[in-house]
Amino acid sequence: MTAAPAQSLWSATATAAPALAPLAGPRRADIAIIGAGYTGLSAALHLAAAGRVVLVLEAQALGTRASGLNGGQVIPGLKTDPDALEAWLGPERGARLVASVGAAPDLVFELIGRHAIDCDAVRSGWIQPATSQAALSELAGRVEQWRRRGAAVELLAAREVALLTGSRRYCGGLLDRRGGTVQPLSYVHGLARAVARSGAEICVHTPALHLRRAAREWQIETPHGAVSAPIVIVATNAYSGALVGALRRSIIVVPSFQVATMPLTQAQRAQILPGGQAASDTWHLLRYFRLAAGARLVLGARGTFGREPGPRSCRHHYRAVVEIYPQLAGVAFEYHWGGLVAMTRDHLPHLHELAPGLLAGLGYNGRGVAMATLMGRLLAQRALGMSDAELAFPVTPVRSIPLHGASSLAARAAIQYLRAVDSLARIHARLRGRSSWI
Ligand SMILES: Cc1cc2nc3c(=O)[nH]c(=O)nc-3n(C[C@H](O)[C@H](O)[C@H](O)COP(=O)(O)OP(=O)(O)OC[C@H]3O[C@@H](n4cnc5c(N)ncnc54)[C@H](O)[C@@H]3O)c2cc1C
């Protein structure tokens, strides 16, 4: 374990960031985008490809928020299963939505290929290992739903999960061959380079301070001058602040924390995730893990609210690593870092039209590598005039979560509760002698 200051494996191993500068004086654009994560960059790329004059405003340096910090797991689909999505939207629209979210990893890997993005992209699949028989039954239903739609998803027995993950702690699982992994910060850098090459401009260290409608245009105030544009896309997700208060109130923000071990030995490497898949298990407070640069194991789980991740979080994650991989007892962490995840009440991402010409996409519930990339394309399509009916994703009104401040407190309480539920389930399984897969 380590008590060293937080630093991410990604920032230590990413490709060089493109040279970008802050805004220099007032500007006009066809479309202004606020936020340069996957959502904003993907929107910019698709809009520039359609010949629009695009300006992206980013408050920080490039990739310092969720898109540069995440686990790099490219996960197909949403947390809501295909049948439920079709029941929600009806067979035709529902089927289109299911097809588009199932193909979201195609978009990621296609952009990586088309723009020659150097980001350690590997498409070897995504595993959901089951932590209980009840979770495994749910996975069986999910597999059946995806297979009915022709997706390359299969149910795995405990032995197969053990072979693929190197962990005997799971009682089965799901393998979705559409998924994969990227170095998330290198993916941001590559997207930003592609955006710049396509003629759009990204201004870093340029926070949008105020947004107002003036005549037919939107005016965005920044410390370095005002930007005017008929269309604005807000792509600030979990880092949405007071700029558009309704967005901030439509999500619950929860911290997630990751650790990266020292490089594994060759023997450990041969056992642990030998096929290079990513995994996110089915605990209520799930653990997600994968291998990354230099054969390090990267593991993430819920972090602690309101505090910089430190030794306590590292101890918690050390216990998780050793529970999954007892063979890693004593392993040291070389990197640790955290970020914020935007959760929604219905577990779905949302595409909003807040006012004429004011669009937003957010709420990926921890699955934004593929989904935010897709959302960027959807936002671009909407900005280019595609109707709600034609879009693969519905445009929904933004809904503030009632008593939002209290809801955030309730989320903290819920997380403590779910942590306790998971702990009890582990104890229960141990008492029943099922310690091989708890
Ligand atoms: C620790 C962690 C692990 C995760 N792991 C995974 C994973 O393995 N797989 C997966 O699919 N998803 C994962 N996610 C979720 C995924 O990272 C996000 O859903 C995705 O990056 C969201 O992209 P975004 O562009 O919408 O938001 P962000 O990347 O957060 O970008 C928003 C940007 O808006 C900027 N901004 C905010 N306000 C302003 C303003 N006023 N003016 C200008 N700029 C502003 C911010 O600085 C930021 O750069 C994880 C998230 C975290 C935090």
Image (cartoon, grey):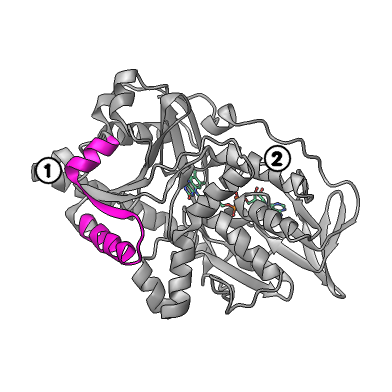
Measured as percent of width and height from the top left, residue 400 is found at 56, 71
Residue span colored magenta: 136-165
Distance (Cα) linking label 1 and label 2? 48 Å
Is label 1 in contact with label 2 (beta carbons under 8 Å)?
Answer: no
Q: Which mark is residue 61?
A: 2
Which amino acid does the dot numbered 1 rest on?
Arg
- Is the CB–ligand 1 distance for label 2 below 8 Å? no
312 left or right, relative to 193? left
Quadrant containing the N terminus in the rendered view: top left
Please indicate, yes or no, whether residue 63 appears anywhere in the rendered image.
no
How would you rate the neighbour count of disc 2 (Cα within 10 Å): few for under 14, some for 14-19, many for 20 or more? some
Measured as percent of width and height from the top left, residue 42 is found at 64, 54
Q: Which residue is mark 1?
A: 434
33 left or right, relative to 108? right
Q: What residue is drawn where x is 54% and y is 70%?
A: 392
Please indicate, yes or no, whether residue 100 appears anywhere in the rendered image.
yes
Quadrant containing the C terminus in the rendered view: top left
How would you rate the neighbour count of disc 1 (Cα within 10 Å): few for under 14, some for 14-19, many for 20 or more? some
- Please tell me how many numbered marks the rendered image carries: 2
